């Protein structure tokens, strides 16, 4: 299943939208990319009924920060990298990492 997410919204809003869609559709995000401005495309995979879906955490990757630094911090918190892509956030192209 694919869904469009409004790229004019905040990262927190997009995270909430994706987490809601996962729970409502018993699915899990497998890809998140920018589409035609300002739309982002979320691709979901169906999950077995009753399987626990850990909430997705979206984090902006600042230009002066290595993704490795973010991944290391999230690994210490028990989270793993799901994706790192440029998407629209507040209408601007932004590099974002998703952790679960």
Image (cartoon, rainbow, N blue to C red):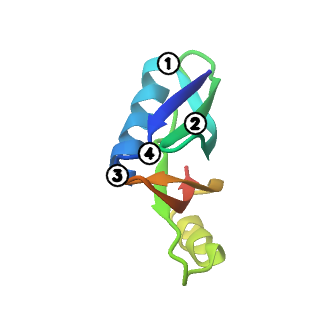
Q: Distance between the Cα atoms at labels 3 and 2?
A: 15 Å
**Which mark lies nearer to you, 1 or 4?**
4
List the single residue furthest toward the top: 49
Q: What secondary structure is found at the residue carrying circle 1?
A: helix
Q: Distance between the Cα atoms at labels 2 and 1?
A: 16 Å
Q: Is residue 7 visible?
A: yes
Q: Is residue 52 visible?
A: no
Dot 1 or dot 3, earlier in sequence: 3
Q: Distance between the Cα atoms at labels 1 and 3?
A: 23 Å
Q: What secondary structure is found at the residue carrying circle 3?
A: loop
x and y percent of residue 34 in the render? Answer: 59, 46
Dot 1 or dot 4, earlier in sequence: 4
Number of the label disc, if any, that sits on residue 41: 2
x and y percent of residue 72 in the render? Answer: 61, 73
To which residue does mark 3 refer? 10
Q: In this image, 91 relative to 79: left or right?
A: left
Q: In this image, 59 relative to 2: left or right?
A: left
Which of 11/38 is in front? 38
Question: Which residue is at 36% across, 40% downward?
Answer: 16
Contact between marks 1 and 4 (CB within 8 A): the answer is no
Crowdedness near tag 4: few (<14), some (14–19) or many (≥20) residues, C-alpha within 10 Å: many
To which residue does mark 4 refer? 7
């Amino acid at each position: 299943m694919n869904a469009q997410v409004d790229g004019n919204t905040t990262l927190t809003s997009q995270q909430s939208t994706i987490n809601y869609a996962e729970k409502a559709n018993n699915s899990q995000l497998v890809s998140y990319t920018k589409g035609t401005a300002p739309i982002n495309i979320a691709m979901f995979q169906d999950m077995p009924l009753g399987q626990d879906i850990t909430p997705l955490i979206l984090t902006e990757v600042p230009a002066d920060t290595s993704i490795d630094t973010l991944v290391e911090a999230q690994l210490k918190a028990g989270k793993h990298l799901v994706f790192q892509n440029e998407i629209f956030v507040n209408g601007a192209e932004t590099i974002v990492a998703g952790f679960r």
